Image (tube, helix red, strand yellow):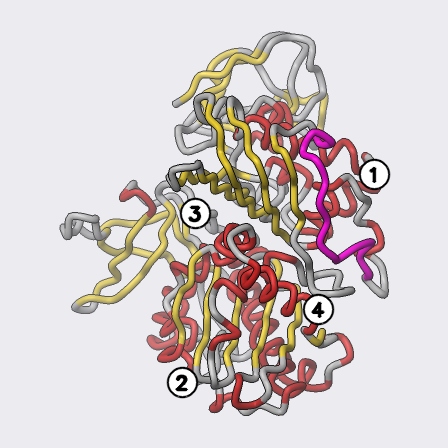
Amino acid sequence: MIRVTIPEGHRGLSLALWLSQAGYSAILPCGGAGRCGNCRVSLLSGKLFDRDDPEKELTPDEGGEVRACRALLPDGETVVGIPDGWDAPGAGQAPRRYVTGALDLGTTTLALRLSDESGAVFETSAANPQCVYGADVASRITATAEKGVKEVQKVLLDRLSSLLSGCTVGRLSVVGNPTMIHIFAGVSPDPIGVSPFTPSFSDRKEFPGALLGLPVGTIVLLPSVKGAGYLGSDLVAGAFAAGTLDFEEPTVYLDLGTNGELLLSTGSRNGGHLYAASCAVGPCFEGAGIGSGVGGIPGAVSRVVRREGEFVFATVDDLPPVGITGSGLIDLFALLLADGVIGRDGKLDEPFALVGRQAFADGTLSPACETPVRIEQRDVRALQTAKAAVRAGIAALLAAAWIDPDEVGTVLLAGSFGRYISPVSAAAIGLLPPGWSDEARAVGNAALEGADRWLSSDECRDGIERIAGSTIVVDLNSSPAFREAFLGGLDF
């Protein structure tokens, strides 16, 4: 636990916002709505007030904890205990010169890679401090409209300055969804939030890092899909780095988070045409919107299997279970469907509590124990809606390209969710079409890899520019295939 003293004079300020501005950040998939529980801190001394009733003192739970997103600071000094898993200030490296850097501006997480002259590579990640304004891009757009883009930008730049403390970087390539890129550059993302959802810019941009107060010679914003409000440079760079253009047969690239970004290459045998779409998935894949859902924090249940009739689960860092992540949720739902606990129509007769044995990294198992994981009917409905949106997005891309699902030869699963998800479980709940689990493989943070490779050669730059400039955007709102597949995809 990290002991943090908050000085007096901050009456009415959100505790979560103060901690974020001080460099202490948790990943908040619920966007500060008080659902995910990732921002729990211990109240060691002083007092806090309730966000919903600012005159009412906030009472800690039985463990002495409060949710920082729900707490307002008092006039006097307050001392809280921060879990060790949170980001802490001063995370930058000792004074050092890096030739290149790559930054993936995720809505939830920031990922940074730095390379020096010897070729040595340093990587780090941090929670995006803008999570205090909301979990998804819509909430970030609203925040910039209410508070001004400069205020929301500053929260991000302050965190990046901390990550780069003591460093200098020659060239930094940056990728992200259009909203994140606009805010990073200090450009209002308002046009992205209203029809026809057109960004202010989507082409590559270069400018001195000093303009943003960062210790960087030149910042390069990689290109997004031309004219698309929700298909960013993270999709473009990731699809290139994952090798989407290299296959002869049709290939699908999926990056699923609070927003689902999908790209289809028809393959070199079929002209190598590219189609992409973005669908609103909701935050359940990142743990929010689920009663016992959490992000990828220590103790989160990340996998669930059955062995000899018992549920066996694994958690992040082998710690006692505190909730369940998106990947664990998909595993569990696949098993509950097979058992008939959840009907194919999504009906759950009574709430389900996960009781099982914990599997540790050394191969040992705990005795059977009850976990905090509870599944209720509303959780089933949230997952139904999310997986139906993804499945329908896939169907719309295939229909636009006149490609049959059976023709797809490779499925590339990107991001942290793609790294941990079981393709077999995903197919079992209908997230992926039948047979695709055999073709699926995780490609990690391909967006960061693509950003890094942009700086390495003309070939890489040409490939990324090609995807950005030639991808056909499929509008799901006007796609009959999407509407039909979404309704049909709600059942498991």
Q: If you read the primary sequence from the N terminus, does the residue marked by circle 4 or circle 1 appear first?
A: 1
- Residue 78, percent from left and from top: 56, 12
Q: Is residue 103 left or right of residue 95?
A: right
In terms of secondary structure, where does tag 2 sit? Answer: loop
Q: Visible in this render: residue 260?
A: no
Tell me whether circle 2 and circle 3 mark residues in contact (CB < 8 Å). Answer: no
Tell me, for residue 435, which label it has, or none: 2
In whole angstroms, how far apart are the C-alphas of marks 1 and 2?
Answer: 47 Å
Q: Which residue is mark 4?
A: 469
Type of the residue with mark 1: Glu
Q: Which residue is mark 3?
A: 296
Tell me whether circle 1 and circle 3 mark residues in contact (CB < 8 Å). Answer: no
Q: Which residue is mark 1?
A: 146
Task: Tell me: residue 311, above or below residue 250.
Answer: above
What range of the chain is rendered magenta?
198-212
Type of the residue with mark 3: Gly
Tell me whether circle 3 and circle 4 mark residues in contact (CB < 8 Å). Answer: no
Image quadrant containing the N terminus: top left
In terms of secondary structure, where does tag 3 sit? Answer: loop
Q: Residues within 10 Å of mark 1 (few under 14, many from 20)?
A: few
Task: Tell me: residue 16, above or below residue 461.
Answer: above
Q: If you read the primary sequence from the N terminus, does the residue marked by circle 4 or circle 2 appear first?
A: 2
- What residue appears at the point 51 percent right and 72 percent down from the top-left corner? 244
Q: Nearer the viewer, mark 3 or mark 4?
A: 4
Q: Visible in this render: residue 419?
A: yes
Q: Is 258 within the magenta? A: no
Type of the residue with mark 2: Gly
> 346 or 17, which lies in front?
17
Tell me, for residue 485, which label it has, or none: none
